[in-house]
Amino acid sequence: MNGEEKATEVKEAKTSLGLKENVEGLFCYLVTFITGILFLLLEKESKFVRFHAMQSTVTFLSLVILQWILGFLAVVIFILGPLFGLLSLLVNLVILILWIVGMIRAYQGEMYKFPIFGNIAESFLK
């Protein structure tokens, strides 16, 4: 079975919630870690959806916490505020890129792993 056949198989498979796997995978990223947690709690059968839900949760929750830390440091260490502000903008850019890539790849039926976060998410599901 080649990659194209496998992606078609994922797109056609139904989940315990009655949606197609690829649509549910996309929804895991829609509202970042919030929908990731929601689908982790609701989806019991689909490994594809649970992977994307866990990856969304691990990725975006980590990056949001990093945003909070940078914001706190920018206020506390006001001399370095502009540096932390720049780093915060870079984290926002990473969030946007991963958000778009995650939704597209999940909708295409791919078990695409983000660098670092994908392996962490996979280890949590074992």
Image (cartoon, rainbow, N blue to C red):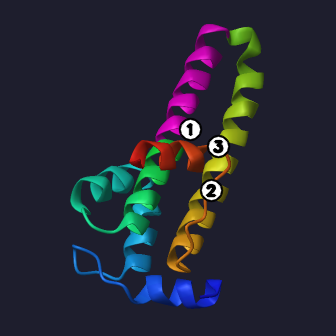
Q: Which residues are magenta?
A: 60-77
Residue type at mark 1: give it.
Answer: Leu
Q: Which residue is mark 2?
A: 98
Residue drawn at 55 percent across, 67 percent down: 111
Q: Nearer the viewer, mark 3 or mark 2?
A: 3
Let me know if residue 105 is in the magenta part.
no
Image quadrant in which you'd find residue 11:
bottom left
Give the main secondary structure of the magenta stretch.
Answer: helix
Query: In whole angstroms, how far apart are the C-alphas of marks 2 and 1?
Result: 11 Å
Q: Which residue is mark 3?
A: 116
Query: In whole angstroms, how far apart are the C-alphas of marks 3 and 1?
Result: 12 Å
Earlier residue among tags 3 and 1: 1
- Whether the residues at callouts 2 and 1 have beta carbons within 8 Å, the answer is yes
Q: Residues within 10 Å of mark 2 (few under 14, many from 20)?
A: some
Q: Residues within 10 Å of mark 3 (few under 14, many from 20)?
A: few
Residue drawn at 43 percent across, 67 percent down: 48
Q: Which residue is mark 1?
A: 63
11 on left or right of 115: left
The percent coordinates of residue 29 (x first, y second) are 46, 61
What secondary structure is marked by label 2?
Answer: helix
Q: Nearer the viewer, mark 3 or mark 1?
A: 3
The percent coordinates of residue 8 (x first, y second) are 51, 90
Earlier residue among tags 2 and 1: 1
Earlier residue among tags 3 and 2: 2
Residue type at mark 3: give it.
Answer: Ile
Image quadrant in which you'd find residue 87:
top right
- Whether the residues at callouts 3 and 2 have beta carbons within 8 Å, the answer is no
Let me know if residue 71 is in the magenta part.
yes
Nearer the observer, 36 or 116: 116
